Image: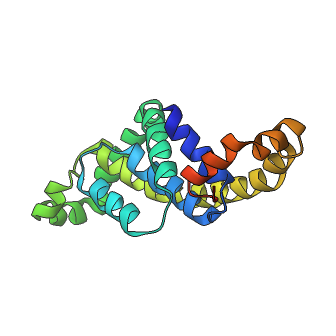
Amino acid sequence: MLTLLAKLFNALNSESSTRQISLAIALGFIVGLSPLLTLHNIFFIFVVLFLRVNIGGFIVAWGFFKGLSYLLTSLIVTVGESLLTAESLQPLFDALYQSSLFKLGHLHHTYTLGALVLGCLLAVPLYYLSNFLIEKYRLHIKAFFEKFRIVKALKASKFYRIYSHVSGQGEL
C-alpha cells in the first residue's frame, strides 16, 4: 500500500497531465463503488488500459473508493431499488431482462445498478474536482515544500539522482 501511495505522490509531483490523473481517479471511483467481477467493471478496466491514464492513481482510487463503498452501501442500494421499482421504468427493465447481456451484467441487482448509476453520475464532478485539486496542489503545496533547504539538499544528493533515473524522470 505504501508503494501505491508513493506512486500516487510520484504522479502528483511528475510532469504528467493533471487530466490523466483526474481521469484515473474518476474511473477508479466507478470501479471501486461496484462489485469487482461485473461486466461494466471489466469494460472500465479495459478503458483504463486503452486510454492514457495514470495506473497508480487508478489503483489507489479504486482501493480508496472500494473502502468508501462500504460506508455508502445503504445509499447505493436505495438508488438501485428506486430505479428498479420505478413504475415508469418497468417496461424498460422488463425488455432489458430478456437479453442475456443485461443478465450477465447483473444490473437487475439493486446494489450493482445503484453503484453503476451513482458512479457514472458522480464521476464527472469528481473528475473536475480532482483536476482542480491537483492543479492547486502543484501550484501551492508542491512549490511550498520545494522552498525548504532540506528538500533542495535531498534533490542535490546522489540518492535523488538514482531515484529519478529509476523512476524515469531524469538521467544518471
* Residue at x-position 35% and y-position 60%: 44
Q: x and y percent of residue 100 in the render?
A: 10, 62
Q: x and y percent of residue 14 in the render?
A: 65, 56
Q: x and y percent of residue 122 in the render?
A: 52, 54
For the question of whether residue 82 can be seen, the reply is no
* Residue at x-position 57% and y-position 46%: 8
Front residue of 142/79: it is 142
* Residue at x-position 41% and y-position 41%: 76
Front residue of 84/66: it is 66
Check the picture and name the quadrant holding the C terminus.
bottom right
For the question of whether residue 162 can be seen, the reply is yes
Give the left or right position of residue 73, taking residue 54 as reference.
left
Front residue of 119/139: it is 139
Q: x and y percent of residue 13 in the render?
A: 68, 52
Front residue of 93/37: it is 37
Coloring basis for residues: rainbow
Q: Please, is residue 81 above or below residue 93 in the view?
A: above
- Give the quadrant of residue 47: bottom left
Give the left or right position of residue 73, taking residue 9 as reference.
left
Give the left or right position of residue 72, taking residue 85 as reference.
right
Number of numbered markers:
0
